[in-house]
Image: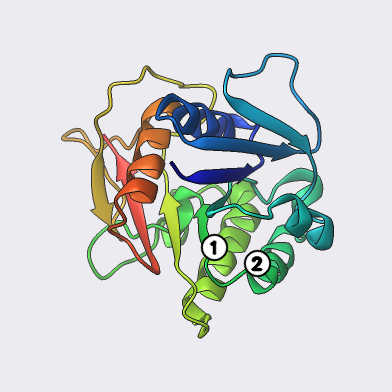
Amino acid sequence: MTRIAVIGGTGYAGSHIVAEAARRGHTAVSIARSVPTDRVEGVTYLEGTVLDVPGLVAQLEGVDVVVSAVAPRGDMEGKLRPAIAQLVAALPDNVRVGVVGGAGGSLVAEGGPRLIDTDGFAEEYKPEAREAIGILEDLQADDTGRDWFYIHPAGGFGSWAPGERTGAYRDGGDVLVVDGDGNSFIGGADFAVAVLDEIENPKHTRERFTVGY
């Protein structure tokens, strides 16, 4: 059994991840700025924020894996990247770090370009995408040897298209996963399956990867 903490565990991605962790029998801890009314059985809910790194580190004592499922949007824009960097530096060396990124940093083909650099990428999403990419770059530049993984969801990932849990997905490596019609999608529950599969059977040590159907 692994003790898994998810920062932003009440958001779309985070809530699915803690639910999947509990489903598999792990010790699942959700840390968010508020505790939800509807709770998943087997999940411990704590109030906390990634912006308070000392307090967060204290809450994370004894955890094996920490997953950040916080998006750099709204009042978190411009704050998440430095907070994650501080958190990674403050955690014990044996704690594995996972980060849920966005689709914007995925390559659209081997060798590039990135999705954010294509003509169809909406301007309003670029600040969030750039900050998420910056978090990845910070992890890639880390020279401490800490174990981490960074996961890009498919382009169509969000509460507007939750889908159903099938337990199936494809790992695209650095490249955005698309279907035969060029669509990129993954449901929330199956995204969480991919995250827990990586935690249980690591295939991307100090690497990023993309998932989709």
Q: Could you tell me if residue 196 is visible in this image?
A: yes
Write the residue at 76% across / 36% down. Answer: 46
Q: Which mark is residue 91?
A: 2
User: In the picture, which quadrant includes the C terminus?
Assistant: top left
Instruction: Identify the residue shown where x is 51% and y is 52%.
Output: 101
Foreground residue among 147 and 142 = 147
Q: Is residue 14 left or right of residue 58?
A: left
Dot 1 corresponds to which residue?
Answer: 95
Query: Where is residue 208, by image quadrant?
Result: bottom left
Residue at the outermost top position: 38
Q: CA distance from mark 1 to mark 2?
A: 7 Å
Q: Secondary structure at mark 1?
A: loop
Which disc number belongs to residue 169?
none
How far across and how far down the image is residue 194, in percent? Answer: 35, 40
Q: Amino acid at mark 1?
A: Val
The three-letter amino acid code for the residue at tag 2 is Leu
Which quadrant of the structure image shows residue 62? bottom right
